[in-house]
Image (tube, rainbow, N blue to C red):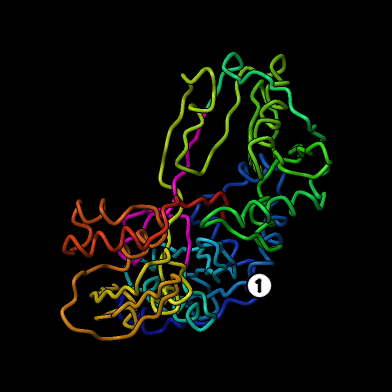
C-alpha cells in the first residue's frame, strides 16, 4: 500500500477518555518516557496513564486514527494568562506527537490548523507551548516569548542573613495560602499563568514526594511569598520562589541560607531578565540562559482589541501588512487605531502600509520579549523610522515572566 492510500484511510476526530491508554502510549513513545523514568518519580505505568485522564476530560484533544488506532495527536489546555494586566484566554498546546511510520503525511499540520480554529472559537486569542523544536514551531507561527535562567550557587556564596520583621514557616503543599500567594504574584507579572486546578496539577505532576513548602509572613502575619524546594545529595533544589515584595524575597533567601551547614550548593531557575548575581554580595555565580516558552497570536483582531497599549497624547494610527503561515484570518492589510487611553481597535484594509510583519514577529513584539527597535534592526520586520518610534511608544516596556510547564 502506497503512502497516498494510507493517508486516505486516516480520519481526524476528537480523542476521548476511552482512548486514554492509546493517548498515553503515544506520549510515552514520542517523548521516550521509560519505566525507569517513571520509577524515579515514583510513578507506575498505570498511574501515569490515569494521571493524564484530566487532559482528556478538560482539554481539547484531537487525533488522527488509522481505523481504531490513534497515530497522531495534540491537546489544547484551557488556560488564562496575564498580559500587561489584562486577563487573556490562552490555548496551551501540548501532547504533540505522531508515530514515525506516519510522518511526512501532513497530519500534524492539519491537526494544528484545526486546533487553532478551535481556539479562535473558544476566544483563546493567544497560544503558548514548550517547544521540542524551535524551528518546527516557528514554521507554524509560534515565536520565543520567554527565557529561563538556571543558576547554581555554592554554599559560600549564599547571601548574608538580613534582619527582617517577618518569619518563615513550613506548611503542607496543600495549604490554601500557597495558591493565594501565587495568584497575587501572577497578577503582578506580565505573561504569567493564572493557574486553574488543571494548571496546578500539571505544574506539580512530576515532583518528588519530599517537596517542601516554606511561606514568608510579614510582621502582620500576612503571607507574602513562598518557596517550593527539596534537598538531595547535599543540593538544595528550588522549584519555585514567589514573592510579592522585596522583604519576602530576602526572607526566603534567609531561609535558604539557613541551610548553609546542610548543603554544598543551591540550584534553581528564574524566569525574568534579571540575573540573580546582581542581588548577591558574592556575584561570581554560575548562571545560564535559554529560551523557554513560545507563543502565537491566534486571532490578531481579538488579541489587539484586548491589548493595553501605552496611553498616548493623541490617537495613533498604523496601517500594516501581516503574514501568517497557517491562518488566513491573520493575513492581509490591517489598520490599528489606538485611543488616548491605550485601548485599540483593528480593522481590515487600509492604504499605504508603513510596516510589514509576520505573525511570529508581531507576537514576540507585542508580548514585550523583543523591542520594536531591535526587531527592525535585525530585519525581522520592515518599517520606516517614525513607525518604529511609534511602536516603541505604544508597547509597554516589561519582560514576560512564565514559570509553568505543561
Q: Give the range drawn in magenta.
A: 127-151
Image location of residue 106, percent across then percent down: 33, 73
Image location of residue 395, percent across then percent down: 38, 60
Q: Which residue is drawn at 64% across and 24% down?
A: 235
Residue 97 is a magenta residue: no
Nearer-the-camera pick, 137 or 160: 160
Residue 147 is a magenta residue: yes
Q: In this view, does 96 lie to the left or right of 362?
A: right
Which corner quadrant of the image does residue 107 belong to?
bottom left
Q: In this view, does 360 lie to the left or right of 209?
A: left
Q: Residue at x 68, y 63 (%)?
A: 196
Q: Quadrant of the N terminus?
A: bottom left
Nearer-the-camera pick, 344 or 21: 344
Which corner quadrant of the image does residue 24 belong to?
bottom right
Q: In which quarter of the image is the C terminus?
A: bottom right
Q: Which residue is drawn at 63% across and 77% down?
A: 16
Q: Relative to 213, say whether 70 is above or below.
A: below
Q: How many numbered marks have been drawn onto this rendered protein structure?
A: 1
Which corner quadrant of the image does residue 349 belong to?
bottom left
Nearer-the-camera pick, 406 or 184: 184
Q: Relative to 314, say whether 351 is above or below.
A: below
Question: What residue does disc 1 label?
Answer: 58
Q: Is mark 1 on a helix, strand or loop?
A: helix
Q: Relative to 129, say whether 123 is above or below.
A: below
Q: In this view, does 382 lie to the left or right of 27?
A: left
Q: Residues within 10 Å of mark 1 (few under 14, many from 20)?
A: few
Image location of residue 87, percent across then percent down: 57, 68
Image location of residue 363, percent across then percent down: 37, 64
Amino acid at each position: 500500500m502506497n503512502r497516498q492510500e494510507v493517508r486516505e484511510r486516516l480520519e481526524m476526530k476528537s480523542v476521548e477518555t476511552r482512548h486514554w491508554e492509546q493517548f498515553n502510549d503515544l506520549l510515552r513513545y514520542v517523548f521516550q518516557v521509560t519505566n525507569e523514568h517513571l520509577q524515579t518519580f515514583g510513578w507506575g505505568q498505570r498511574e501515569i496513564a490515569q494521571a493524564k485522564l484530566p487532559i482528556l476530560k478538560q482539554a481539547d484533544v484531537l487525533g488522527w486514527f488509522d481505523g481504531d488506532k490513534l497515530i497522531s495527536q495534540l491537546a489544547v489546555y484551557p488556560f488564562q494568562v496575564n498580559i500587561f494586566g489584562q486577563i487573556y484566554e490562552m490555548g496551551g498546546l501540548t501532547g504533540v506527537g505522531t508515530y514515525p511510520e506516519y510522518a511526512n503525511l501532513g497530519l500534524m499540520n492539519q491537526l494544528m490548523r484545526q486546533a487553532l480554529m478551535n481556539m479562535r472559537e473558544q476566544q483563546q486569542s493567544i497560544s503558548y507551548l514548550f517547544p521540542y523544536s524551535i524551528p518546527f514551531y516557528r514554521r507554524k507561527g509560534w515565536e520565543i516569548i520567554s527565557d529561563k535562567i538556571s543558576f547554581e550557587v555554592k554554599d559560600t556564596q549564599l547571601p548574608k542573613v538580613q534582619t527582617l520583621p517577618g518569619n518563615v514557616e513550613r506548611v503542607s503543599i496543600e495549604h490554601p495560602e500557597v495558591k493565594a500567594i501565587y495568584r497575587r504574584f501572577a497578577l503582578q507579572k506580565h505573561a504569567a499563568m493564572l493557574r486553574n486546578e488543571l494548571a496546578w496539577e500539571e505544574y506539580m505532576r512530576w515532583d518528588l514526594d519530599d517537596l517542601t513548602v516554606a511561606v514568608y509572613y510579614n510582621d502582620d502575619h500576612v503571607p507574602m511569598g513562598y518557596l517550593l524546594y527539596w534537598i538531595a545529595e547535599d543540593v538544595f533544589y528550588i522549584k519555585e520562589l514567589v514573592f510579592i515584595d522585596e522583604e519576602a524575597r530576602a526572607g526566603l533567601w534567609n531561609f535558604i541560607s539557613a541551610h548553609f551547614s546542610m548543603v554544598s550548593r543551591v540550584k534553581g531557575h528564574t524566569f525574568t531578565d534579571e540575573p540573580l548575581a546582581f542581588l548577591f554580595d558574592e556575584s561570581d555565580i554560575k548562571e545560564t540562559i535559554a529560551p523557554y516558552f513560545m507563543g502565537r497570536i491566534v486571532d490578531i483582531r481579538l488579541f489587539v482589541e484586548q491589548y493595553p497599549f501605552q496611553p498616548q497624547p493623541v490617537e495613533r494610527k498604523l496601517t500594516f501588512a501581516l503574514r501568517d503561515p497557517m491562518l488566513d484570518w491573520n493575513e492581509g492589510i490591517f489598520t490599528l487605531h489606538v485611543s488616548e487611553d491605550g485601548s485599540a481597535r483593528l480593522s481590515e484594509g487600509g492604504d499605504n502600509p508603513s510596516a510589514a510583519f509576520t505573525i511570529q514577529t508581531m507576537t514576540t513584539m507585542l508580548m514585550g520579549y523583543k523591542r520594536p527597535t531591535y526587531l527592525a534592526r535585525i530585519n525581522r520586520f520592515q518599517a520606516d523610522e517614525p513607525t518604529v518610534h511609534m511602536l516603541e511608544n505604544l508597547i509597554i516596556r516589561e519582560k514576560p515572566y512564565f514559570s509553568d510547564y505543561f
